Image (cartoon, rainbow, N blue to C red):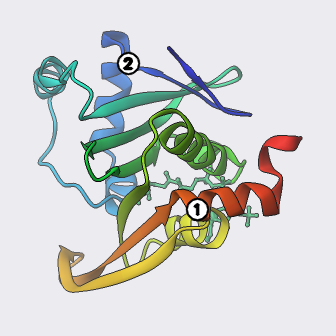
Amino acid sequence: MNIKGKKVLLRAIEPQDLAQLQQWANDPEIQSGLGGWHFPSSSEDQRKWYASLSLGSINQRFALETPDHGLIGTANIVDIDWKNGNAFHGLMLGDKEIRGKGYGLDAVMTIMRYAFEELGLHRLDGSMIEYNEASLGLYIGKCGWKEEGRQRDWYFRKGRHWDRILVGVTAADHKELVVTTKYWAS
Ligand SMILES: CC(C)(COP(=O)(O)OP(=O)(O)OC[C@H]1O[C@@H](n2cnc3c(N)ncnc32)[C@H](O)[C@@H]1OP(=O)(O)O)[C@@H](O)C(=O)NCCC(=O)NCCS
């Protein structure tokens, strides 16, 4: 079942998305903001990655789509721990031209609503490189997430080490945010 936000749709990743995902996987600007890392990625790497995706419910990976732009990025909820009710969430908007238009905000609001109101999770975890101001502004500034810790010198990028900021949001934080912002009312 697809998951609908106000601006974005979360749907399954399809084989025809792989060429675009490979382009983003090889884009240094996009990858510099992300915590993950890989060497230059071939179309064969992409196919193997796609084939390895589990149909199980522990890892959920979505394509982000808008009516105007088609595929704009990906979002995931992974390492779901059903007993404790927690999971890790990550997000990437691929096309730089579509940033700053509220799609990131809508994607995170939609992921949280799905995680807390459909999956029944209790909290989500995330992490970001200390220089990723867009991400910190989005999650902490707008979406009710809290900084919960810092792992010093965790990443090595651009010739030096950077802290890894651990962030999280609980179902209660989310409930309060939705009431305060009335995000889904308009
Ligand atoms: C981080 C990212 C998801 C933001 O998405 P976006 O669609 O551009 O953001 P939105 O337009 O929804 O902005 C929502 C809020 O996020 C914050 N924000 C967005 N871009 C920002 C920037 N460059 N600097 C500081 N804050 C920023 C602002 O608070 C903004 O609210 P405002 O417009 O009222 O000021 C996007 O830039 C991205 O995918 N970057 C590359 C990959 C990445 O860093 N992923 C996250 C890894 S944890």
Q: Is residue 127 above or below residue 30?
A: below
Q: Is residue 146 above or below residue 139?
A: below
* Left or right placement of residue 45 versus residue 50 in this view: left
Which quadrant of the figure shows ligand 1?
Answer: bottom right
Q: Amino acid at mark 1?
A: Ala
Q: Give how far across and how far down residue 92 sits, in percent.
A: 44, 46
Q: Give how far across and how far down residue 159 sits, in percent.
A: 18, 81
Q: Nearer the viewer, mark 2 or mark 1?
A: 1
| Disc 2 from disc 1: Cα separation | 35 Å
In the rendering, which numbered label is found on residue 172?
A: 1
Q: Give how far across and how far down residue 149 sits, in percent.
A: 33, 83
Q: Is residue 91 above or below residue 141?
A: above
Q: Quadrant of residue 127?
A: bottom left
Give me the residue at 86% from left, 42% from top. Answer: 185
* Left or right placement of residue 122 versus residue 178 in this view: left
Callout 1: SS: helix
Depth check, front residue: 9 or 122: 122
Depth check, front residue: 58 or 171: 171
Residue placed farthest to the front in the image? 83
In the rendering, which numbered label is found on residue 1?
A: none
Q: Amino acid at mark 2?
A: Asp
* Left or right placement of residue 112 versus residue 154 in this view: right
Circle 2 residue? 17
Give me the residue at 30% from left, 11% from top. Answer: 15
